[in-house]
Each structure stands twice: as C-alpha cells, then as structure tokens.
Image: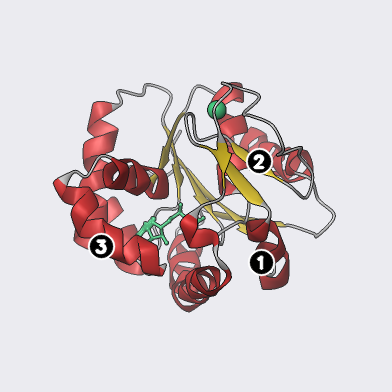
Amino acid sequence: MNIILNAPSGGGKGSVAEKLVKDYNLCHISTGALFRENIKNKTPLGIKAESYVAKGVWVPDELTVDMLVAAMKDLPCAGGFILDGFPRTLKQAELLEKYVDVSMVIQLDVADDIVMKRLAGRFMCRHCGAIYNSNWDDVSGCCKACGGELYQREDDKTDVIKQRISNYNRDNGAILEFYKNKNLLHTVKVKEEYLPADTYAFVKEIIEKEGKK
Ligand code: ADP
Ligand code: ZN
C-alpha cells in the first residue's frame, strides 16, 4: 500500500505520517526531511537544494524525483510507503507513475489561516525529527521520544511560510485533479479545533475502507 499525503505546509502531514508508521507496516518518506538532511550534511544535493529551501520555493522536479527514487531504493519496504510532501507539482506526479503504484491520495484540506497559526507554533526535534506544536504540546523541554533539543525551522518564518502556502495554492489544484481522475483522491476537511488525533481518526477511516477493497 503506497499512500500519498497531500496538505499545505503545517497541514499535519508529518504527524499523520508518524502515526501511520506505527499502525501500519509503512515507511515514511518526507522529501522536505530528506532535503534538510542533505543540507545539514552538505552533500552535493544539499548544496544544490539549499537556496530553494531557504526561500520556500520548490526544488527543481528532476532533483527532487531523483532523490526520492534513491531514498525508496535504500529503504526496502515490504508494506509500502507514505509519501509526505511529494508530489508538489503535476510534473512530479507524472514522473512518479514510472516508479510507484499509488494506492490512494489523502488530502488534508486546511484553510490558510489555520496553517499560518500552526506553523508559527511548530517545533521539531533536532535529533529524531519528531514534530511538536506549542498550540497543544509543551515545547519548553526536550523531545519526549529521544531527549533531543526542540527548535523552530528557519523556513517557518512568516514571509517564507507565505511563499510556501502560495506555491501550494498555485500548484495543488492540478495535482488533485490528476488523482481525482484516477479515482484515488480522498479528502479530510480539517477544522480549526481538530487536534492531530482527530485528523488521524478520519485518515484511518479512509485507509480501513479503501484497504479492504
Ligand atoms: P512544509 O512544512 O512546507 O510541508 P517540507 O518540509 O515538506 O515543508 O519542505 C520544505 C522545503 O523543501 C520546501 O519549501 C521546498 O523547498 C522543499 N521541498 C520539499 N518537498 C518538495 C517537493 N516535492 N518538490 C520540491 N521541493 C520540495
Ligand atoms: Zn527526538
């Protein structure tokens, strides 16, 4: 089972993916996390991607797809993958067809104002990448999973956030259309009061229903 999680920045893809990994036998691949890892390690790919990520614009499609395909080869994953933050363009969706059988696409539909609020409160563990949010988690201490330091991403500053949201709004319609035409699209409408567990319950419902088909 290969699942694409589609949501704007701060829409909750990462927390849903963390839970899916625990409940199903899936491997989580976040292209954003892969870029951050490459940038941190100053790999040739990281050096190429750095300026795009810092500005909050998409890294070129070919670079992104090559990185993703290599990561999937490195991660032998019998149960399948959760793709988080990929595809971000129609071109990426089309290229992905060559490599992966997509089982379903779950879109978290989150309004821009909710996303802005959530991103401003988002913290990550420097060590294991776990996600926290000051809107509902205690972020004053260390990571509860591994004891690592919590930090706020450089690209979660307001102007870069706005850039990312505007890219998403520009490109995502074509992606949704692409998967809708293949009968693979499912949508969860996320309300402001939802906690991660609420969103996840809806996601799980979709997977349970679809998985049995
Ligand atoms: P977000 O919190 O916005 O969902 P991500 O961690 O998914 O952020 O991505 C961070 C940055 O990495 C993006 O702003 C972009 O520069 C780059 N990136 C991630 N995924 C992709 C992708 N599929 N295509 C192009 N660029 C990407
Ligand atoms: Zn941690």
Which callout, 1 or 3, points to the residue nearer the camera? 1
In the image, residue 210 above or below residue 26: below
In the image, residue 139 above or below residue 22: below
Mark 2: few/some/many CA within 10 Å (<14, 14-19, 20+): many
Q: Which residue is mark 3?
A: 61
Mark sitting on residue 132: 2
In the image, residue 140 above or below residue 74: below
Q: Is residue 91 visible?
A: yes
Give the percent coordinates (x, y) of residue 134: 74, 47
Q: Is mark 3 within 8 Å of ligand 1?
A: yes
Secondary structure of the residue carrying tag 1 is helix
Q: CA distance from mark 2 to mark 1?
A: 15 Å
Q: Quadrant of the C terminus?
A: top right
In the image, residue 65 above or below residue 52: above
Give the percent coordinates (x, y) of residue 8: 56, 62
Q: Amino acid at mark 3?
A: Asp
Which callout, 3 or 2, points to the residue nearer the camera? 2
Looking at the image, is mark 2 or mark 1 earlier in the sequence?
Answer: 1
Q: Would residue 143 be found to the left or right of residue 128 on screen?
A: right
Q: How many marks?
A: 3
Q: Is residue 99 visible?
A: no
Q: How is the image coloured?
A: secondary structure
Q: Are marks 1 and 3 in contact (CB under 8 Å)?
A: no
Give the percent coordinates (x, y) of residue 103: 46, 42
Which residue sits at x=72%, y=37%?
Answer: 140
Q: Amino acid at mark 1?
A: Met
Secondary structure of the residue carrying tag 2 is strand
Q: Which residue is mark 1?
A: 116
